Image (tube, rainbow, N blue to C red):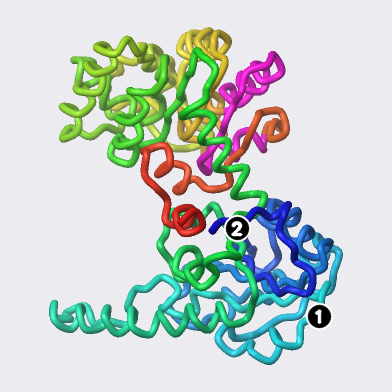
Amino acid sequence: MQQYIDSYDFTGKKAIVRVDFNVPLNEKFEITDDTRIRAAIPTLKKVLEKGGALIIMSHLGRPKKVDPKFSLKHIVDRVSERLGAPIQFADDCMKADEQAAALKPGEVLLLENLRYYAEEEGKPRGLADDATDEEKAAAKAAVKASQKEFVKKLASYADCYINDAFGTAHRAHASTALIAKYFPNDKMFGYLMEGEIKAIDHVLHEAERPLTAIVGGSKVSSKLAVLKNLVGKVDNLIIGGGMGYTFIKAQGGSIGNSLHEDDLMPDALAILEEAKAKGVKVYLSTEAVGTQEFSNEAETKVFSSCNIPDGWEGVDAGPHTLAAWKKVIDGSRTILWNGPVGVFEIPLFAKGTLRIAQDLAEVTAQGAYTLVGGGDSVAAVTQMGYADKVSYVSTGGGAMLEAIEGKELPGIAAIRE
């Protein structure tokens, strides 16, 4: 039975909380962006304020073994500073029995990186490249068998479980999905998870119309399922970034050296046909910024998106494209944005993406609901100082994509069961 953090009685109880503290570190192991830590603080404070003790667990990076550079000890001071409480540290998440048992109300224990153990992801490690199918199957079975003990140990530390890690909700990992079974009447979402779920549900099921989706990124293959699902839900679909050129070429356009996927052109045409049949308006780039080299000092020219010369590559949306898209955005009441509309990592080619961020901030101020998710999209609204000027910024790019695809996320399903 799912509980709710606002009504749950944490008095005298230990709560084990799965957070997403997978924050970026520089070469000195200093945190360069603590957004994910700050996002989890309201949930953590709630437990302490209501008389509970905290056991915090997370992953950091993708270690294949115990590696000091991926240790969560690097973030202890920052978490303590943001939480306003001292943090104890368990340097092995599987050997924290005594520390967990000794925790008193108001105290906090941070477990070492869960992914130091293969059991967290449930995938075998260290297999030889020439391993046989039988060896692979045996290794997988061994990890799955030991995973049960891994989950049981984590669960033994606490009286209740909170999942507040939306960024990993699409993974059926030990700490995001399997552990919930040990707390049938004492499992709940944290505030961050609740916010993410409500924001996505609002856009997909309760949106005020017109509803517009802006989908960008480099490849159609990475967003194909998203596009197919959205065609049945939105009024307007803006397709930008590198993936747009597959659609343009599929319709007979000349795209020069622009990124595209020939094998997905039939899928692109099918999406356009389905959109037409359902009365969904699709907006592609009509004008592109082109270049001959990926450099911030490169020469650029503006071309018709369907007439880019050989040797030139479309790398950003042109002025006429952005003006046309702005009209669509301005006329929308709900907008979902995932993915850049240019090569965002190069400032010269990031102007279109930043313009989208500005347009969304402006329409939000006029009463529209705007949901932004995905690394570069979030970076754009943050860089422009608009993170608090859109309705909701999602912390989980991959999880958000799968939710938009219509999939049930394991980390969410485990709490609702």
Residue under pointer 1: 104
Figure check: 98 above or below 48: below
Give the overall secondary structure of the magenta segment: helix
Q: Quadrant of residue 16?
A: bottom right
**In the structure shown, which secondary structural element does the residue marked by tag 2 occupy?**
strand
Q: Amino acid at mark 2?
A: Met
Q: Quadrant of residue 354?
A: top right
**Gap between marks 1 and 2 measured at Cα:** 21 Å
**406 or 344, which is in the foreground?**
406
* Placement of the C terminus among the 4 image quadrants: bottom left
- Say which residue appears at 58% left-offset and 43% top-offset: 196
- Provide residue 18's location: percent of width, then percent of height: 59, 65
**Is residue 400 shown to the viewer in this render?**
yes
Q: Quadrant of residue 190?
A: bottom right
Residue 188 - label: 2
**Is residue 346 shown to the viewer in this render?**
no
**404 or 32, which is in the foreground?**
404
The magenta segment: 354-383
**In the structure shown, which secondary structural element does the residue marked by tag 1 occupy?**
loop
- Say which residue appears at 25% left-offset and 23% top-offset: 271
- Provide residue 415's location: percent of width, then percent of height: 51, 57
In magenta segment, residue 355: yes
Does 98 sit left or right of 129 as displayed?
right
CB under 8 Å between callouts 1 and 2? no
- Provide residue 346's location: percent of width, then percent of height: 52, 37
- Provide residue 252's location: percent of width, then percent of height: 18, 15
- Say which residue appears at 57% left-offset and 35% top-offset: 199
Q: Earlier in the sequence, mark 1 or mark 2?
A: 1
- Say which residue appears at 63% left-offset and 18% top-offset: 368
* Placement of the N terminus among the 4 image quadrants: bottom right
